[in-house]
Image (cartoon, grey):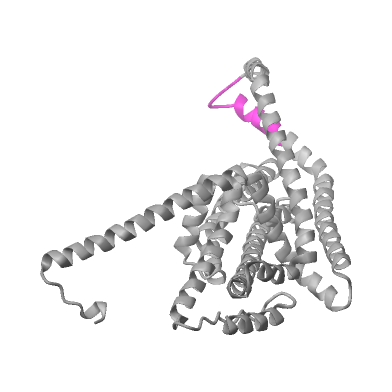
Amino acid sequence: MGAGNRRWADRGDAIGHGLSWLARWSTRLALAAVGFVIVSWVIGKLWVIVMPVLLGLLITTVLWPPTRWLRSRGLPPALAATVVLLGGLGVLGGVVALITTSIVSGVPEIADSATQALQQAREWLAGPPLNLGTSQLNDLVEQGTDQLQSSVGSIANGLLTGAGRVTSGVVTGVVALLLAFFFVKDGPRFTPWLRGVVGERAGAHLTVVLERVWDTLGGFIRTQAVVSLVDAVLIGLGLVVLGVPLAAPLAALTFLGGFVPIVGAFIAGALAVLVALVSNGLTTAIIMLAIVVAVQQLEGNVLQPILQSRSLRLHAAVVLLAVTAGSSLYGIAGAFLAVPVVAAAAVVLRYLSEVIDRHSGAEETPPTPPSSEPEGASARTKGTADGTSHG
């Protein structure tokens, strides 16, 4: 007799069965929570290794399409990966060089505007309602200088701490680039090796899951690029309309900063407002600040949640909660990596749900992978289906 048609002897038996069911699931959830805490603790201890690996995978999603094209034209894997990696670094270096050249060429204009702004500020302070004389202004300057000198020690410590973080970031970036090179060069050999290690049956499921996770990571990078481009265009248009110099390099900095959550957008917006203040005055700076805040609110509350929820098949609320949790646990890096990690976890859960739905006792056929697979995925998929059906 099925569980749904079962009749209990009395209410006590029914209540006892319900309590037993609740106790079993409570124990399972408690054990799962303990496992999650242990995994989080291990990740925190090994963050210096986990961070470059995750960044390397994200970089690989960008480098793989041109590498696949070169390999289809007959280039060896190592040469194709080297060409694409060096080409990507060259493009990034060229963009940075153009930004630097534009900024250097605009420095004299900004310096002249800053001098005029300081003179206007002195005249305003000397007039009503403050009526500060020259001696009083000099006293204020001296007080500020003394305060700065007394804070030299704390400033130096802050600079040393910042320099240490920058150095650590540079090392992490270099390691991530090296890992991305190996991922691009040897990536298609990973799933066959994995299937040989874990066996054909488990390897069949892992192959499909990993390919779906790979597509999810690619969608995350494309979405982030679109969001950063929209930010750069809107802020760049605001700079052009207001007549602020260095509009093009500031827009480029906004685009690059969009890939660094929270801090990147804040620094790029602060630079735009500062240049507007120095070159065009307080009124223009206030308008520019309003534009930057509006664009950032549009990005954080509308564009990013909606676009990422569509490309990653996650609800916008889940995206917001993931970013909040990631930033509170692991800082800026956690905010950036939280969304792809949660999206990958969602891929695994969806696949498990599909397997459960398809489960029919003797046959478990993994769903067919998506069409946008890396090179060799179709052959692996065929092997996946064959291996599963014979399992």
Name the spot of residue 322 as percent of width and height, x first: 50, 56
Q: Viewed as shown, does residue 384 lie left or right of 8?
A: right
Where residue 158 sits, quadrant-wise, is: top right
Q: Is residue 324 shown above or below 190? A: above
Pick the quarter of the image with the N terminus: bottom left
Tell me the quarter of the picture where residue 83 sits.
Answer: bottom right
Residue at x 46%, y 74% (from the top left corner): 353
Q: 39 and 169: which one is in front? A: 39
Q: What stretch is highlighted in magenta?
A: 117-132
Q: Please determine whether, in this image, residue 369 is positioned above or below residue 137.
A: below
**Residue at 83%, 78% in the rendered image:** 72
Q: Main secondary structure of the magenta part?
A: helix
**Apparent side of residue 97 relative to residue 305 in the rendered image (left or right):** right
User: On the image, which quarter does residue 282 sit in?
Assistant: top right
Q: Which of 198 and 32 is in front in this view?
A: 198
Residue 302 is inside the magenta segment? no
Camera-side residue of 268 and 92: 92
Kindly identify the residue that appears in the image at 45 percent across and 80 percent down. 359
- Residue 143 position, x and y percent, is 63, 16
Any part of residue 146 in sight: yes
Q: Residue at x 60, y 52 (%)?
A: 261
Return the residue nearer the eye: 234 or 188.
188
- On-image quarter of the C terminus: bottom right
Q: Position of residue 266 (x, y in %)?
A: 61, 47
